[in-house]
Amino acid sequence: MPIRESFAPIVTSKTLSTVFIAAIAVGGYSVLAVLKENSQYSGYGDTPSEFHAVLSLVLGWMLVFRTNTAYSRWWEARTLWGALVNASRNLSVKLNTYGHVESDQLEQARQLIVAFPLALRAHLRDEVKTKLPTQVHPLCSSWNHKPLGVANNLFRLVGNWRKADLISGDDQRVIDAELLRLMDICGGCERIQRTPIVRSYRLFARQCVILFLATLPWGIVQDFGWWTILLTIIMSYFMIGLEIVAEHVEEPFGYDEDDLDLDGLCITIERSTNEVFLSHPSPEFEI
């Protein structure tokens, strides 16, 4: 049911459950405003409602910009990895089709194409020394920049084919177009990883959220009474949620549930590459 699908993640999602707990904590804080309003000190320390109207406008602008900026980074990363899937498929088809290359040489090309996304994944997660797959090590063992090492071996392999007249110069130029895309994609991912959103802006947005939530109960308690607690929890859930989700998606290469499924994309590339290199054409299509 749509209702169950909308509210079940509050319990099952690590991110949303953290947001909900934080919202409950702010709701507990709002009890102070309600108790004060029902005591002899009613009227003291209340925040004018106009203050929250102005602050809501400013905070809305900031959160929209913050969320859009973070999501644009996530989407650009997804676009780059989508381009890597396409480049790997195109490269596999071209290397497997052009020229008269022996099967053992094609096997080397297949291993290198499959290794590139694995090396890039470990590189983006700073896990080259801990989680780089064992089959990738021999292909770039002497390189600090593992994706560059794999790409260099691919360029070297295609260059050797050209020197041995296994492919023509035109074939090499067509293949180079796909090879160049590999390092372009790697560079785009590195730019996202190494250029986070400006720290001062992140802190400024966070401070604005904290100020808004800290003063919210005192500004609405006169109008809503005990309902102030529920309204504070709801407002806190969405305000804190937008900030936390934005913080997660602006770094899309990690292990958070909102990050890119790099493992799945690597498997997709491996399956597509294996299908191209290990397939046997039907007799009517043989050239």
Image (cartoon, grey):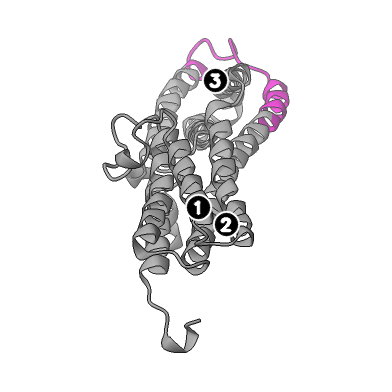
In the displayed structure, 188 sits above or below 218; it is below
x, y (%) of residue 119? 40, 40
At 64% from the left edge and 35% from the top edge, which residue is drawn? 69
Tell me which numbered mark, 3 or 2, is placed earlier along the sequence.
Answer: 2
Residue that badge 2 annotates: 175
In the displayed structure, 133 sits above or below 37; it is below
Foreground mark, 2 or 1, reads 1
The amino acid type, in three-letter code, at marker 2 is Ile
Residue that badge 3 annotates: 210
Residue 173 in the figure: left or right of residue 152: right
Residue that badge 1 annotates: 158
Instruction: Please say whether residue 256 is visible from this viewpoint.
Output: no
At 49% from the left edge and 84% from the top edge, which residue is drawn? 285
At 54% from the left edge and 58% from the top edge, which residue is drawn? 86
Instruction: Please say whether residue 102 is visible from this viewpoint.
Output: yes
Q: Secondary structure at mark 1?
A: helix
Where is residue 56, by image quadrant?
top right
Give the residue at the far left of this rendering. 134
In the displayed structure, 284 sits above or below 109; it is below
Bounds of the magenta span? 36-61
Indicate yes or no whether the magenta region holds residue 129: no
At 71% from the left edge and 27% from the top edge, which residue is drawn? 53
x, y (%) of residue 114? 39, 52
Number of residue marks: 3
Give the residue at the far bottom of this rendering. 284
